[in-house]
Image (spheres, grey):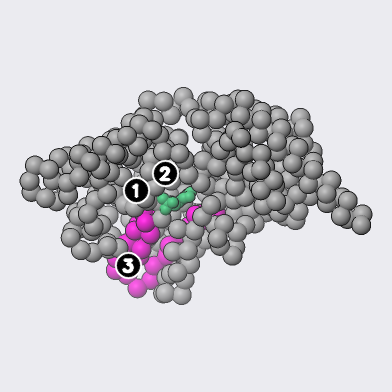
Amino acid sequence: MKEIYLDNAATTRVNPQVAERMMDAFSNNYGNPSSLHRIGMRAEQTVKEVRERIAKTLNCQSEEIYFTSGGTEGNNMIIKGIVENKQRNRSRIITTSIEHPSVLDVFAFYEGHHIDVVVLGVDDKGLIDMDELKAAMDMDTILVSVMGVNNELGTIQDLRAIGKVIKTVNPKCVFHTDFVQGFMKIPVDVAECQLDALTLCGHKIFGPKGIGAVYIKKGIALKPLMRGGGQEKNMRSGTENVPGIVGLGEAIALRQNTYREEITTMRKLRERFIAGLEATVEDFKINGDPNGSPYILNLSFNRVRGEVLLHSIEGEGVYVSTGSACSSHKKEKQYVLKAIGLLGEYKEGTIRISFSKDITEGDVDEAVAIIAKAVAGLRLLVKVRRRK
Ligand SMILES: Cc1ncc(COP(=O)(O)O)c(C=O)c1O
C-alpha cells in the first residue's frame, strides 16, 4: 500500500544524505571535541562549522549558538535559565495560551513561586493582541516567550512587532521565541526581531531527532540546566552529540538555498488540498490564520471524531494527527483549539495535515479523496446509530 505521510509537523523522515553524513561521523569523526589530540580536534572543528552555519541562517554570531538535545531542552534551558538567574524580589514572565507544552508547562511550574506568570490569550486565528502584550508588560518583566509558528494551527506571530513592543516598554526584558516549527521553513532574523533567545531542533527539517540548538544573545545571563564538564561555555555540560550535530548541519545545508522557494510549493499544495476538500466535503472548518505557515493545515469536520477519522484513513495509507504529537499523551489535549474558541462537535472532529517537500499534487488528490470518503462513511454511521 502506498503511504502518504502528512504528519511532518510531528517529525520528518531523515534525508538519506543526512543519514549518510551521520554514518560517516559515527565511523570516522568519532572523537570527543574536548580531547586535545587530532581526532578530538577534528570533531571540534565539525561542531564549530555547524555552529557557524546556524548563526548565519539566524543572523547572529556563532558564539551565540549552543547545542541541545532538541526543542524541549532548548525551551526549558532558556525559560528556567532566565527565571533561576533572577536577581529581583518581584518578577513577571509572559507567554501565550497556545505555546508547546515544553514552554507552557515550565511557565505553569513557576506559578506560585513568587513569580507573576501571565498567559496571554489569542484571537480566533491564534494571534496575540499587541495592546494586550503592551498592557501586560512592566519594568519587572524579565521574560516574554512567544512561539514563531504554532505547531497545531500554523499561525505565524509577528515577531518583529512583538520585539518592538517588548523593547519599547522594557529594553532589559528577554524576548524568546520557540522557533521549532519555523526554522528553515520561514526566514527569521534575530537582530531585526530584537530577539534575545530562540529555540530550534533538527527533526522537523529532515534532520535527526535528539539534536537542537538555542541562540542566546551575548550578554544575556542564564543559569545552566546541566552542570558538569563545562562544554558549550559552561552553558550545557555533556559531551557534544557530534553525529547529531553533523546531521543538523547537513539538514540545514540541504535546505539553505531551496526553502524560500519551497514556501510557494507548500502554499500551492495547501490550496489544492483545501480546494479538493471544498469540492467533496460539506460542513468543515479551516482553523488558524490563512496567512499562517503553508506547511500546516488544521481542519475540523462536524459530526466526525478526529481520532476515528485518523485511524480510518490510516487504513488507506494516509497519516495525519489530531493535534500535536507532544500533547497526544496529555490530559488537556485540545487547549489550542479551546484558546481559539473552537466549540462543540467541530472541536472533536479536528485533524492536522502537515506537508513536506516529499508530497506531490497527486498525493494531495489521493489523500483528499480518501479523507472525503472516510468522512462521508463515518457521518453515515453516526446517522444510522442516531436513528436506532
Ligand atoms: C513548537 C514546538 N516546540 C517544541 C517542540 C519540542 O521539540 P523536540 O521534540 O525536539 O523536543 C516541538 C515538537 O513537536 C514543537 O512543535
Q: Which mark is residue 203?
A: 2
**Vertically, is 187 above or below 68?**
above
Residue 288 seen in the figure: no
First of labels 2, 3 by sequence position: 3
The response on whether ligand 1 sits within 8 Å of label 2 is yes
In the foreground, 373 or 27: 27
Q: Position of residue 228 (x, y in %)?
A: 20, 63
Q: Residue at x 14, y 51 (%)?
A: 34
Q: Which amino acid type is shown beneath numbered disc 3?
A: Glu
Do labels 1 and 2 touch, CB within 8 Å? yes
First of labels 1, 3 by sequence position: 3
What residue is pinned by disc 1? 211
Q: Answer few, some or many: residues within 10 Å of disc 3's Cα (few below 14, many 20 plus, some between 14 and 19).
A: few
Q: Nearer the viewer, mark 2 or mark 3?
A: 2
Q: Specify whether 74 is left or right of 35.
A: right
Quadrant of the frame with the C terminus = bottom right
Magenta span of residues:
73-100
Q: Answer few, some or many: residues within 10 Å of disc 2's Cα (few below 14, many 20 plus, some between 14 and 19).
A: many
Q: Which amino acid type is shown beneath numbered disc 1?
A: Ile
Dot 2 falls on a residue whose secondary structure is loop
Q: Residue at x 31, y 45 (%)?
A: 244
**Vertically, is 163 above or below 229?**
above
